[in-house]
Amino acid sequence: MKRVTFSALLTTSVLAVATTTARAQEADVIHWWTSASESKAVAALAEKFEAAGGTWSDAAVAGTDAARTAVSTRIQAGDPPAAFVASAVLEYQDMARTGQIANLDAVAAEMDWENTIPASLLDAVKVDGHYWGAPVNMSVNNFLWTSRKALEAIGETEPPKTWDELFEMSDRLKEVGIIPYAHPGKWYWDLNTFGFILASQSPEAFSRFHSLDPEVFDDPAVLQAAEIYAKLRDYSDSGAPGREWNLSNQMVMNGEAAFYLMGDWAKGEITAAGMTPGEEVICTVSLDDAPAAISGDAMLFPSLDGSTEPSPAQLLLAETLTSVDAQVAFNTLKGSMPVRTDAPTDNLDACSRLALEHEKAHGSVSAYPALLSGDAAGSFGDVLGNFWVDSGATAEDLVYELQDTASLFN
Amino acid sequence: MAQDGSISMRRPLKLLQGQTALLPGWLILIVAYIGTILWTARISFTASRSIPVDTFVGFDQYARLFRSNRWVQSVENMLLYGSLFILGCLIIGFLLAVLLDQKVKGESVFRTIFLYPYAVSFVVTGLVWQWVLNPSLGLQKAVRDLGFENFTFDWLVDRDRAIYVLTGAAVWQASGLVMALMLAGLRGVDGDLWKAARVDGASAPRYYLRVVLPLLKPSIFSSVVLLGVAVIKSYDLVVAMTSGGPGNATELPAKFIMDYLFGRQNLGLATAASVVLLVTVIAVLAPLAYVQSQRARRIRT
């Protein structure tokens, strides 16, 4: 009895696979966009894809880790989805190099990615000079969020523009009993924050640091960044280690703390609390005219039938996804920014517009997930996290430790 | 004669039947346990990152493992956490069992209360203790709000003390289990022993330490084994309570392995760490198992 049901099950699943491959324009997409605004955005994207002649088959998985597991298991089991969402192509570089991911060079050329998408986003979807993913959206990661209430407490109206100004204000904030800096203390925020500081001192040192150049540690910019990071530690509270970013956000929203650096996703929490980003919580991009640190999700297309050439459905989806039309429709609903520089900006909110202007004036760099392997990122994060809780360690110690860690990967 | 013959004919058949019945068990043991251990050991000698590859690099992963401050600290933490945890659970569990053994009223109520934390998962334990001990949310803030402005209790974010907080939470969770095991043991102790000890003029503490404790050896041994297993696989409590922080202060080997296996995508390093952990466990257990088997043999003969 049991055997019968099992074989029946097997037949149906084989049939299911057969029917998916039969319909050439159908694409099943694994993604983790399941919140209210995100699923609306996905629906808009699906609509554009269907209008272009494709058939969207939704395979949403809640949670990034669960989605990643679903992707890996299906690829390993030989039943890959037509497309899936990833934070960075780097994560899947082993699969790209072993021919398990489709090559998108043709789509990139056809849609003129080079001239219409910021270079730092394109770097994030390239491995060994080839395109393995399509950029989906753009987020600015290094907004300095400032509590207006805290500023008013020390008689200021404008947020700081340089680190010197920030530390000068911080001294006065301390006197009135406000925590100057609400550091989010997970290792990845430690690493992000250090990267933002380094980019504010020297974008060149930033990119050399993230490409694990052993010489970069002789650059004075790295020591300067370490000094600012050490100072930030002194101006943060003792509750920082291990703190989630939304708790930091809350501290800034209610004026308990004055500043913190975080990506544009903080807007969602601010709006949910009934406030307006840019009003009660002011947004500016980093300090010292630093480049905007940008990141974005990418859509990857597993190789089907053993070929790294994308299938017709995959090709169509990649083209649709990076068209101006779909970019605007998707990102307006999701609350992020279109990747295309030629997309109209009138739908964007004040903070996003400000970030775009900043990016035009001061350029952009990629945030670390596109640049470092999980291993290297985690190891740097460990060093920065340990430094944060070791009040005896100096900026020189930090540079030495970072250099030592970088040497593991050369 | 004829009877003997039929028995010797049947014996191999019976044996064959028995072995056939055991076959699935053997298969599971060989493939699922020994097989995966060998596979893990093999990967630890390769340069595998997110997917297993066959590029052999010798002992490179092991060299990197022991160069890693985080791994060394994880192992040190495990030794400290493990010994305090096992000792703490044994002492508290034994004391609770002895107290309950005094034929107190409402014993079953107390027993339930003391055993209750064990029914709570480590994740929940970790979260609750994290909230209670977080300086800006929990105990410290509550006492300060009562008017004691200078009250400070920030062990959870103090890198020299966080490991003790972790141990405390684990002891709170698991000592109920030890209590239950010890209580079962105590119920097996003959009540006449107490009368005899009293006649000899022994005090109650002396009676429990000198007479009862040696009788509880089997309970103690199973407690130590259960707690030891809990120490080796400690992962969820750390993740929920401190996520290894502050810094690396509460990192444990199991968390190191999980981090490198998935988030950090370094299969080679993670499997090397697993192998080292396994070898350590075997090194501790082998002498213990030897002593046990020798003792069992002595009892039999």
Image (spheres, coloured by chain):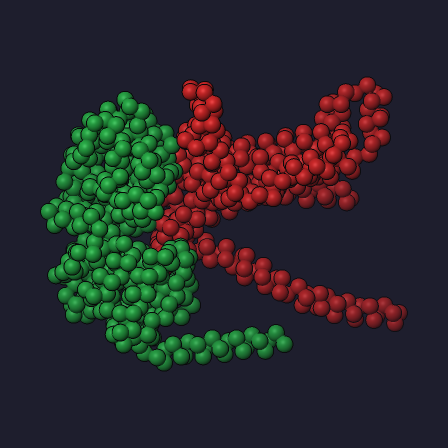
Give percent across and percent down for residue B45. 40, 53
Colour displayed for chain A in the image of the structure:
green
In which quadrant of the rendered image does the C terminus of chain B lie? Answer: top right
x and y, in percent, of residue B193 in the image = 82, 29
The colour chain B appears in is red
Residue B204 visible in the shown view: yes
Residue at screen point 41% across, 79% down: A18
Instruction: Give left or right: position of B118 versus B259.
Output: right
Quarter of the figure with the N terminus of chain B: bottom right
- Residue A89 visible in this rendered orientation of the protein: no
Query: Which residue corresponds to the image point at 40% horizontal and 52% vertical from the top-left?
Result: B262
Return the residue nearer the eye: A23 or A271. Answer: A271
Task: Tell me what residue is drawn at x 16 percent, y 45 percent.
Answer: A291
Q: Residue furthest bottom?
A: A22
Q: Position of residue B9 (x, y in %)?
A: 79, 71
Give the camera-side residue of A66 and A391: A66
Q: How many marks?
A: 0
* Position above or below: B264 against A302: above
Toward which corner of the image does residue A328 lie, by quadrant?
bottom left
**Would residue A341 appear left or right of A297 to someone viewing this image?**
left
Is A103 located above or below residue B72 in the figure?
below
Closer to the camera in the image, A318 or B198:
A318
